[in-house]
């Protein structure tokens, strides 16, 4: 019996669709490396229809213009570190314009990659070693925080990963060891929370109140919330929250006091208006720069800038405060939520949430340790925050 001939994909140098990722690719003749085809907006071409195929063929024609006449395997011209950085900066610029990348990520990327180019931008990618990047990081005496060092190295690695994914340029720093994460495990106490409310003006007070009671990322999530993202259910109010950091949307329930405040603010920001629920005194969404300046002024007014712990308070610490209170049972009579539940509420993975908060604050993971030494009552061995009625009062 004659065997059916296996149908092969198109030859090297043609555009082809990969069902697994639903994207279009091409393969340079003489290699096995697939190159993702991108449209004129810098995004991957998806779909297997005739329109997608036509766009992919046009993208392939643009891609072939960069190929060397005597070499079918690499783009024309040498790939230097500066070229990789420039390509990633342009990618982030397009993402900022499309709303898929936050301004803070874009600004950090531009600052760090331009600094790297000043250090070793003339090196070819094949000459770059992990030691060059580590020496570059160590050359900045002002980068004392491991968070800053880790962030810079992450951006550099992302730039080379993109060059490898899009253009087949091998990443020379793949697997580089970054500093360990050291999350700032600071939580605002109920007394300090009340002091903030008593000191700041009404618009910023509402913003901080919602941040502490929902755990949303202050500026890329909470500040962009509008009435169109609000849903009312029999059990209460739910928010549909989009995060530009994760590029995902999640639905979360909010506490009754937050729901009451939201309904009050929606009177001046109804559905369809596009006006943010939590806005500044000018009616504009809160931005990172203005929020940081406002919080620094509050700390100086309260003389917290002289306190070794309170000087670390910030708008983002409101998110840590929410996690601490959820894990310690602040609103549930001492019955702390699980890591998985908290991760869903704050839009992180369970592994990330545990890595940041679990060992210090998670009651569900500490209880077995106490039980193992014969101390079965977690409430007598852990600090349980108790809310005060005047802290959860309503604002308008």
Image (cartoon, rainbow, N blue to C red):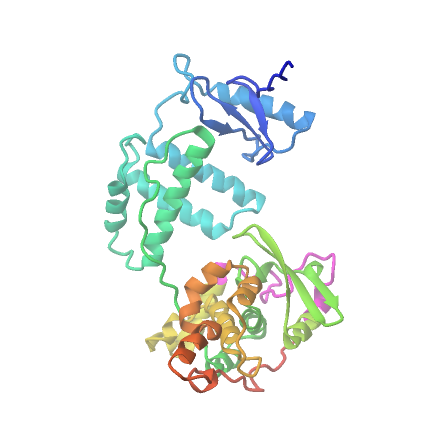
Q: Give the left or right position of residue 37, taking residue 374 as reference.
A: right
Percent across and percent down for residue 71 are 39, 15
Magenta-span inclusion, residue 277 = yes
Q: Which residue lies most toward the front here?
A: 1
Percent across and percent down for residue 191 are 47, 84
Could you tell me if residue 186 is visible in this image? no
Percent across and percent down for residue 124 are 30, 30
Residue 218 lies, with reference to residue 61, above or below; the image says: below
Give whichever of 347, 282 is nearer the camera: 347
Could you tell me if residue 362 is visible in this image? yes
Q: Give the left or right position of residue 17, taking residue 190 as reference.
A: right
Q: Quadrant of residue 113?
A: top left
The secondary structure that dominates the magenta segment is loop
Residue 377 lies, with reference to residue 5, above or below; the image says: below
Q: Which residue lies most toward the right here?
A: 234
Percent across and percent down for residue 309 are 36, 75
Residue 124 lies, with reference to residue 177, above or below; the image says: above
Q: Quadrant of the C terminus?
A: bottom right
Q: Which residue sits at x=43%, y=67%?
A: 357
The part of the chain drawn in magenta is 265-290
């Amino acid at each position: 019996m004659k065997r059916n001939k296996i149908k092969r994909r198109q030859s090297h140098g043609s555009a082809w669709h990969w069902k697994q990722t639903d994207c279009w690719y091409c393969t340079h003749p003489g290699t096995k490396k697939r190159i993702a085809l991108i449209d004129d907006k810098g995004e991957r071409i998806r779909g297997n229809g005739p329109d997608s195929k036509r766009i992919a063929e046009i993208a392939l024609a643009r891609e072939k213009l960069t190929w060397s006449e005597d070499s079918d395997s690499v783009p024309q011209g040498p790939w230097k570190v500066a070229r990789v950085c420039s390509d990633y900066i342009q990618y982030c610029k397009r993402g900022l314009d499309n709303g898929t990348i936050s301004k803070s990520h874009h600004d950090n990327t531009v600052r760090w990659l331009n600094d790297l180019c000043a250090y070793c931008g003339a090196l070819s990618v094949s000459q770059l070693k992990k030691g060059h990047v580590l020496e570059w990081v160590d050359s900045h005496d002002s980068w004392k925080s491991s968070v800053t060092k880790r962030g810079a190295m992450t951006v550099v690695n992302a730039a080379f990963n993109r060059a490898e994914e899009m253009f087949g340029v091998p990443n020379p720093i793949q697997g580089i060891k970054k500093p360990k994460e050291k999350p700032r495990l600071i939580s605002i106490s109920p007394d300090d929370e009340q002091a903030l409310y008593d000191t700041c003006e009404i618009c910023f007070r509402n913003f901080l109140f919602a941040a502490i009671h929902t755990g949303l990322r202050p500026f890329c999530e909470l500040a962009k919330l509008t009435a169109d993202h609000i849903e009312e259910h029999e059990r209460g109010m739910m928010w549909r929250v989009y995060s530009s950091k994760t590029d995902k949307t999640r639905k979360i329930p909010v506490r009754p006091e937050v729901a009451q405040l939201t309904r009050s603010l929606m009177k001046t920001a109804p559905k369809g208006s596009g006006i943010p629920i939590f806005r500044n005194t000018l009616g504009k969404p809160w931005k990172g720069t203005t929020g940081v300046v406002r919080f620094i002024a509050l700390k100086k007014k309260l003389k917290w800038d002289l306190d070794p712990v309170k000087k670390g308070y910030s708008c983002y610490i409101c998110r840590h405060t929410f996690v601490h209170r959820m894990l310690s049972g602040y609103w549930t009579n001492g019955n702390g939520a699980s890591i998985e539940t908290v991760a869903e509420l704050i839009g992180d993975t369970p592994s990330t949430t545990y890595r940041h908060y679990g060992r210090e604050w998670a009651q569900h993971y500490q209880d077995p340790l106490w039980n193992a030494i014969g101390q079965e009552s977690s409430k007598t061995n852990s600090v349980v925050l108790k809310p005060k009625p005047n802290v959860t009062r309503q604002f308008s």
